[in-house]
Image: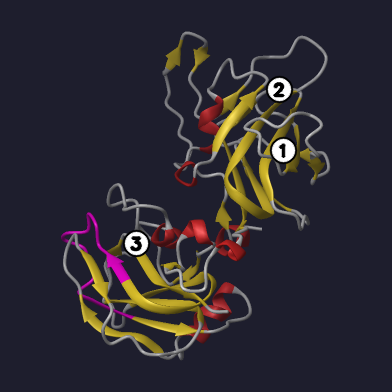
Amino acid sequence: MTQLRQLYVNLAQPRLGAAVVYATDDFFADKARLIDPADPVFIPGKYDDHGKWMDGWESRRKRTPGHDFCVVRLGLPGLIEGFEIDTRHFTGNYPPFAEVEVCRSDDDVPADDAGWTLVTGRLPLQGDHRTYFPIQHREPATHVRLHIFPDGGVARLRVWGTVAKDWSKVGPDERIDLLAMENGGRGIIANDEHYGAVENLTAPGRGVNMGDGWETRRRREPGHDWAVLALGAPGLVDEVVVDTAHFKGNYPDRCFLQGAPEARGSPEEIGAQSEDWPVLLPEVKLEADTVHVFREGLADLGAVRFVRLNIVPDGGVSRLRLIGRVAR
């Protein structure tokens, strides 16, 4: 089930514009914390005016019929593949069951008649636990409604899927970042993500700090580190941007890029295939805390859908941008 995290993007992350827009009750813990990108924490002895401070969404003990729910507006319309419901640090106050609905709506908080579709059965939950639920739903969604029965606390909700980009609105000569998360780009696999996740390479904007990038551990053996990513659509790349923002004593010395029009199989199988892909950008020198723009020397590989970023020998990269046109 954890392969959901390898293959898909979290559509409920605030940096894409996602927000928790409604909750029946968040007396004990603010609903906004439900989609905080950081892992939940427990702080012994921390209390506020309502009681024990908890890192997540928590409703009060229900003394009337019914149950609690909240509504998450996704950052971008997407095809949802599954959910992660995380109850870490909620032990005597987690909900024993949950259900999830989705809909597509232009409203900030869709009404009950907005065409909500139940995409899970009644899900049993455990305390202090992370549970993954794959689903089958082939229509793009903009909102998720999480029902908890009858009340309690959930630390985090992750909504795994792919961005449903409307490519008909992109002109044939329009140059865009084909690897951007908002255009459907995503990380597939990396040989090492010790300090930072590969998905950060495709995130919007520049990295906010050194933790907002892909960074490997210090390599003590021969070789180099690498990551494989998928473009949102097959494209003709004419510019590569490698941004080492905030990486100063730990940026890679060099990098090179490989590309391919297709790849199949598991993330591990795709990673193995990528070793033999042709070179898109030959090995180039990198500098600390710098936006590197490469236009000269790019190989004409035609339309590519997958790329492998090789960093030599190790270190951190904040963002990778592949600028070009969608292949028609």
Q: Which residue is mark 2?
A: 151
Badge 3 marks a residue whose secondary structure is: strand
Q: Disc 1 residue type?
A: Leu
Alpha carbons under labels 2 and 1: distance apart: 12 Å
Residue 174: where, in percent of width, then height?
45, 69
Q: Which residue is mark 3?
A: 319
Number of marks in picture: 3
Q: Quadrant of residue 214?
A: bottom left
- Residue sitting at x 61%, y 38%: 73
Let me know if residue 91 appears in the view: no
Q: Disc 2 residue type?
A: Asp
Give the mark, 1 or 3, whose residue is nearer the N terminus: 1
- Residue sitting at x 54%, y 62%: 184
In the displayed structure, 12 sits above or below 185; it is: above
Let me know if residue 193 appears in the view: yes
Q: Which residue is mark 1?
A: 125
Q: Which quadrant is the C terminus positioned in?
A: bottom right
Report crowding for label 3: few under 14, some 14 to 19, many 20 or more residues within 10 A (C-alpha).
many
Badge 1 marks a residue whose secondary structure is: loop
Badge 2 marks a residue whose secondary structure is: loop
Residue 129: where, in percent of width, then height?
62, 41
Q: Quadrant of residue 121?
A: top right
Residue 17: where, in percent of width, then height?
50, 42
Say how the picture is coloured.
Answer: secondary structure
Give the mark, 2 or 1, whose residue is nearer the N terminus: 1
Residue in the foreground of this view, choosing between 60 and 129: 60
Q: Which residues are magenta?
A: 241-256
In the displayed structure, 54 sits above or below 49; it is: below
